[in-house]
Structures are given as C-alpha cells and as structure tokens.
Amino acid sequence: MNFFAWIGRHCINLIFYIIDLACFLTQTISVWQPHRNVFNRAVYLVVLEQIILIGINSIAIISLLAMFVGFGVTSQLIYIMQSLTGNNDLVEIIARLVLSEIGPLITGFLLVGRSCSAIVVDLGNTRVGGEVEPLEYMGINVDDYFVIPRILSMVISQTVLAFYFLAVMIVCGVFFSALLYDFSVQQSLMELLNMISLNEVIRFTLKNLFFGSIIGTIACFHGLLVDSSSISVADQMQKAVVRCLMFLFMADAYFIIFTL
C-alpha cells in the first residue's frame, strides 16, 4: 500500500509540476505582444549572446559526437541490416531510426548537460547576488530580459545543431561503411535523400523545436526558483537536468506513438 501511495504522490507532484511549467511558459509567451517592444536592443543582444554560448560553442563537441556515432553506430547498423535485409530496407531503417530518433535525442542530451545546467547556474547566481530585484524596480521585465532570450536561443540551437549532427553522422557513417564493406555511397545517399519527404522534415523540425522549448523552459524555471542561498543553485540545477531528461524521453515517446 505504501508503494502505491508513493506512486500516487509522485504522479500528483508531476501533474502540478507540469501545470506550473505551463503557467510559467504562458506568462513568458504573453510578453510577445507589439506594445511590449520585445525586439529592443538589450533583448536582441542577449539572444545573440545566448546563441553563441548555447549553439556556436557546442559545434565542436557536436561534430565529434556525430563522427563517433557515425563510425560506431551508423556503420554497424549498415553492416547488420545489409546482411539481414535488402538495400531498400536498409535505407528505410536508417531514415527511420537515425534521422528520427538518434539525432534529436543526442543533441538534446548534450544541450541538457552543457547548457541547461549553465542556464540554471547563471540565473541562480543572479538571484543569489540580488541582481533581479533592481531590474524589476527599474521597470525591466524579467521574462523579457532573462527568460525569452534563453528559451528562444535554446530552440534555435537545438534545431540547427540537430540538422548539423544528422548531416555529419550520416556522411561519416556511410563513407566509413564504404571503406569496410561492399557498399555504394552515392546510391545509398541518393536513396536516403529520396526517402526524406517534406512531412519527415516538418516532423523532425517540430520535434526539435519541442525539445528545445522543453530544455529552455525547465532551465529558466528552475534558475528563477533559486532563493538567496547558494546551496539552492546546485539543488535546482540537479532537478532541472533530471527533469529535462525525463521530459525529453516522454516527448520522444509521444512522437514515436504519434508517427507510428
């Protein structure tokens, strides 16, 4: 009975947490109104700064991960599937598994570990240092200056890096397989490109937009929950990372069910 009570409490807490996140995101989106003048110079500069920190600075590690995954996962998948199925089935499996699942998830995991924790620490230290309240007294909206640039930058970075990750991973995997096995690079790449329809591209883009919004929203939410204690920064960072990973798996499961 205690086990079921524990499950029930955690389910209720999860529901309330989702409601809090939804309210937080709704409040944040509400500033995107013409009379709020969101596209001011200060916010624009913060967006550029966050895109550099989140996206551009992650290109090197994304490139390495994409090459390693291409060499280790894609090439092995090509070898196994080529021995079990035909070439058409092989291309379909690569398009379905690698393009739809591996790319967005690995990109999301990297941004969770690298950028989500950084956002929580950044906003948490801002809270601890008492830098938020003076801005509010000056009439500067916290959502305008802190939240929107980070969520927007996370969404853009997740989407662009996922496309870049896929391109490097597929090219490295296919060319590495061509060196080891009897495998036509040009034919396989052309068949793979022909199988990618507009609906697949739209679904892939929506998935990464959703992943980016999840990571950015949870990171900003927990960063602004930090109180005056510095110990709270580490606590909120741990919660943000764990819950980002959990919500990414939940979102991925939803997209899998939705696309079946």
Image (cartoon, rainbow, N blue to C red):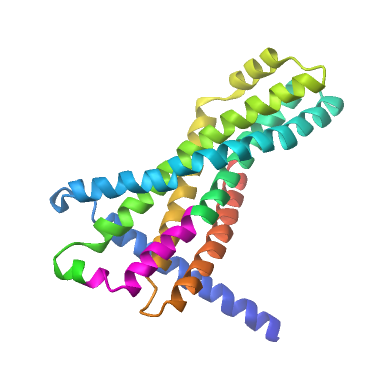
Q: In the image, residue 102 lies at what x, y percent?
A: 63, 41
**Which is more toward the observer, 141 or 126?**
126
Give the left or right position of residue 57, taking residue 195 as reference. Answer: left
Q: Is residue 125 magenta?
A: yes
Q: Residue 2 in the image: state x and y as whole percent.
A: 69, 86
Residue at image point 74% right, 14% down: 184
Which of the 4 quarters of the picture holds residue 167? top right
**Would residue 46 be visible to someone looking at this image?**
yes
Quarter of the rendering occupied by the C terminus? top right
User: Horizontal placement of 105 versus 135: left or right?
Assistant: right
Q: Give the quarter of the figure containing the N terminus.
A: bottom right
Q: Give the range drawn in magenta.
A: 115-133
Q: Which of 168 and 205 is in front in this view?
A: 168
| Residue at the limit of the structure toward the bottom, as seen here | 2
Q: Is residue 206 visible?
A: no
Question: What secondary structure characterizes most of the magenta part?
Answer: helix
Left/right placement of residue 196 relative to residue 185 reads left
User: Percent from the top left, x then y, of residue 174?
Assistant: 70, 24
Q: Residue at x 24, y 56 (%)?
A: 144
Residue 19 x/y as whole percent:
42, 67
229 lies above or below 22 = below
- Residue found at the far right of this picture: 83
Q: Which quadrant holds residue 233?
A: bottom left
State the residue at coordinates (75%, 19%): 178
Query: Vertical placement of 193 versus 11: above or below?
Result: above
Question: So how many labels did they put on this image?
Answer: 0
